[in-house]
Amino acid sequence: MRTFVQRLLGYPVVLATLAVAAVGGLLEATGNPTAARWVVSAFAVVVALLQARGMVADLRAGNHGIDLLAVTAIASTVAVGEYWAALVVCLMLSGGEALEDYAAGRARRELTGLLQNAPRTAHHLGPDGRPTDVPVDEVLVGDRLLVRPFEVVPVDGVLESDDATLDESSLTGESLPVEHARGDALLSGALNGGDAIELRATAAAADSQYQRIIALVREAQDSKAPFVRLADRVAVPFTLFAFVLAVAAWLVSGDPVRIAEVLVVATPCPLIIAAPVAFMAGMSRSARAGIIVKSSGTLEQLARARTAAFDKTGTLTHGQPQVTRVDADGLDPEDLLLLAAAVEQYSSHPLAEAVVERARGTGRTVPSAVDVVETTAHGVRGTVDGRVVVVGKAGWVAQATGAAPATTNGDTRIHVSVDGRLAGSITLADELRTETAATMAALHRAGIRTTMMLTGDGTQVARRIAAEAGIDDVRAELLPQDKVDAVRSAPLRPVMMVGDGVNDAPVLAVADVGIAMGARGASAASESADVVITVDDLSRAARAVQIGRRTLRVAWQSIGMGVGLSVALMLVAATGSLPALAGAWLQEAVDLTTILWALLAVRAGRSERAETARLTADVARSRVERERASAIGAAPAAAPRGV
């Protein structure tokens, strides 16, 4: 109750309107209708003058609105003695501001929640292990920090405790808690859902993931979609229609009251409130899904997109090599992998890291090696349990075995010898993401006509990746400027472009909608993009299109409903069948209905829920198929390969 009163005090015109209504009602009840008329009419005139001043300011700022209808509605009802109808219009105008704030608050809930949850302090652990509270902006890289239960991780860091359970829903949209082990990277903004943990900062606050999201949210808070500006312009012909109808009703009937009766139902809130509320709701729901939309106009562009272009490396693929196949001669493939990993774990080469990661994924312990020697650009040699293991390029291994390994047919492959004998090979590739093919299919179902892949890689590799992903148009061996030209010349527009790297920044900037895969911190791409996906999941690009379409549809429905009902009421009022007071209350009901309808954009519609479920199921099925295909020693046709 106290909260309601506090909020009501923030709207003095609403309070004044209610007070005047009470005074006027009391005067009429005590037999003083003339006094009631003067009190209510005087107040209505004051409100009309204040509204007129605001209207002039809006016109000077270039914003077309329907304030003129409200002002003339009050003036005409006062002039013909319908002062109670004038007071209802005053309540509609003043209450509309409160209703707009409420609806906007509901629509922006996820965006404001991100801002409110931003960590402001951190518990710095000194040399003696005692925590000291410091402003989060003073945390330095390398500082040890304590995060207590149900506190937010203040900066990006590495977990130094044995384990942690974090709620990362504000970052990724994933509702289930995520388990982490010692050495795992932790993102700022995650909520500690378990015991107190310790971490070592790997980034300052300004460079951490959550602060980047906060910066994007602030940019998204104050934007006006072209669709909303269109709604402003719709108000001009609507206003002219209302005035023409009101004057015509007066001339035909000879009754000046008809003007007031028409104008009190000619102030539709959808043109000034409902459409912006729908867009704010769509942006908020996007944020909940880990998709930060920088401007509300971007949602309309997403809804209308006809071409979707993608960078390859790091966007359609994982962006790093992974083991796709192990061929062994005389050894179990898993044993060969472990022997190779035993010497590769002492190398910093990206291919070595991929081999070690896959070996650890078997669940077995990677053995130690001694006498390890790495020869730059060739390979590494070491002794594992008394066996000499050589891992590297074909020529390097051939020197140890005296036998040349088989040709690779363009695959990225490292060879392994054990005790001077060729023991097998390990094939690696930058694999297609498990969700890529499902994302392309979902985009086509959402209305995308053409999908394109823009890459600097060779044509053969690009075509193979495109075939696996289900992409329509392949552009290979492109320089950054070539990608820009390809997007600019795309015939079906608008064009959305999805990328993740620094070299993608120019093409993201020229696309109608640039979407950055920002989970890995590609700041240049994120700054150039209109949309930033904060979780490493390409399928969120399809979700963004779905949310954009839902938002645009709800906005149009709100405007169509409001304008349609208002026109219908005006036509009825023009015949003299709708008294001014009744019309004013009906218009209030229309406004409330359309604004509540606009809030539907906060929730997914039935078709969108079904599409999201289908996309999730397709991704899960692809993941299962990938796990089967990537079994060690799998047949060549079972494992998709990249470069």
Image: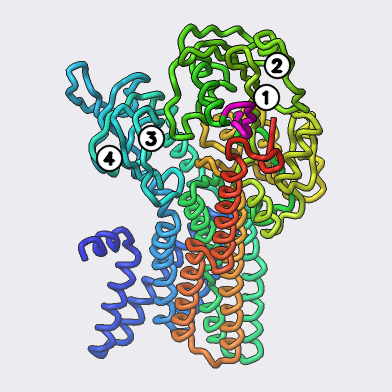
288 horizontally vs 23: left or right = right
Q: Amino acid at mark 2?
A: Ala
Question: How many angstroms separate mark 4 from mark 2 (CA)?
Answer: 52 Å
Residue 506 pos. (x, y %) = 68, 31
Tell me the element at label 4.
loop
Question: Quick one: label 3, few (<14), some, or many (20+) residues within 10 Å?
Answer: many
- The residue wearing badge 3 is 188
Horizontal side, residue 538 vs residue 40: left or right: right
Q: Are marks 1 and 2 in contact (CB under 8 Å)?
A: yes
Q: Which mark is residue 394?
A: 2
Marks 3 and 4 sit apart, C-alpha to C-alpha, by 11 Å
Q: Which residue is mark 1?
A: 413
User: Who comes first in sequence, dot 1 or dot 4?
Assistant: 4
Q: Please give the residue where the numbered disc 4 appears in the rendered image.
A: 151
Q: Is residue 421 left or right of residue 166?
A: right
User: Between marks 1 and 3, how big is the CA–CA gap?
Assistant: 38 Å
In front: label 2 or label 3? 2
Q: Nearer the viewer, residue 198 or 595?
A: 198
The residue segment tinted magenta is: 321-331
Closer to us: 550 or 455: 455
| Between discs 3 and 4, the one toward the N terminus | 4
Q: Does residue 324 show up magenta in the picture?
A: yes
